[in-house]
Amino acid sequence: MELLGERRMEEPSEEIRRRIEHARAIQQERYRQRSHFPFNSGMNGREIRSHAPLDREGQELLRLAFETMGLSARAYDRILRVSRTIADLSGAERIEAGHVAEAIRYRVFDRAVT
């Protein structure tokens, strides 16, 4: 499959399933104190600050995205939730700038489609 001039390796369905199950297990453990919905999409503001901290590079990338795209505070939280999930899917304990960049791309795509 060629996308934007880059060759992408196709990932087998079983590998994708394994990564998703692992990410779900991470999230269920992270939110075990919650009595409902133990996933990143249910993070409140306090949980976002606790479980989705960004390094300096990630913060700068997000700041630039907001300045150039005119995003809202609600979009900020959504991008952090998605970044946390992308990090979980990749097996990363911390959110990295690449995770933030991917989440921003999804947000741009979402805005273009709707």
Image: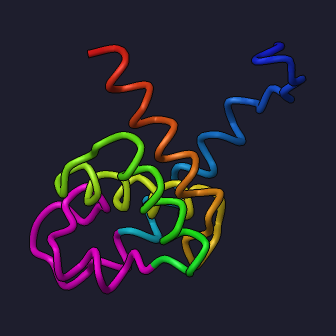
Q: Residue at x 32, y 86 (%)?
A: 50
Q: Is residue 96 above or below residue 15?
A: below
Q: Nearer the viewer, residue 17 or 68?
A: 68
The magenta region covers: 28-53
Quadrant position of the C terminus in the picture: top left
- The spot of residue 71 in percent (x, y) is 27, 45
User: Residue placed at 40% from the left, 52% from the top?
Assistant: 82
Answer with the quarter of the image where residue 41 lies.
Answer: bottom left
Q: Residue furthest left?
A: 35
Q: Position of residue 80 (x, y in %)?
A: 37, 61
Task: From the viewer's side, name the closer residue of 16 and 78.
Answer: 78
15 w.r.t. 67: above or below: above
* Rendered position, 31 above or below 60: below
Per the image, is 46 magenta? yes
Q: Tell me the quadrant of the picture where the N terminus can be found.
A: top right
Q: Would residue 15 be found to the left or right of residue 34 on screen?
A: right
Say whether residue 55 is left or right of residue 46: right
| Residue 19, image x, y percentages | 62, 51
Residue placed furthest toward the front: 67
Q: Is residue 38 magenta?
A: yes
Q: How many marks?
A: 0
Residue visible at 76% across and 17% down in the picture: 3
| Depth check, front residue: 53 or 64 | 64
The colouring scheme, among rainbow, by chain, secondary structure or one colour, is: rainbow
Residue lying at 11% horizontally and 66% vertically, measured from the top left: 36
Quarter of image, res 38: bottom left
Query: In terms of image quadrants, where is residue 22?
Result: bottom right
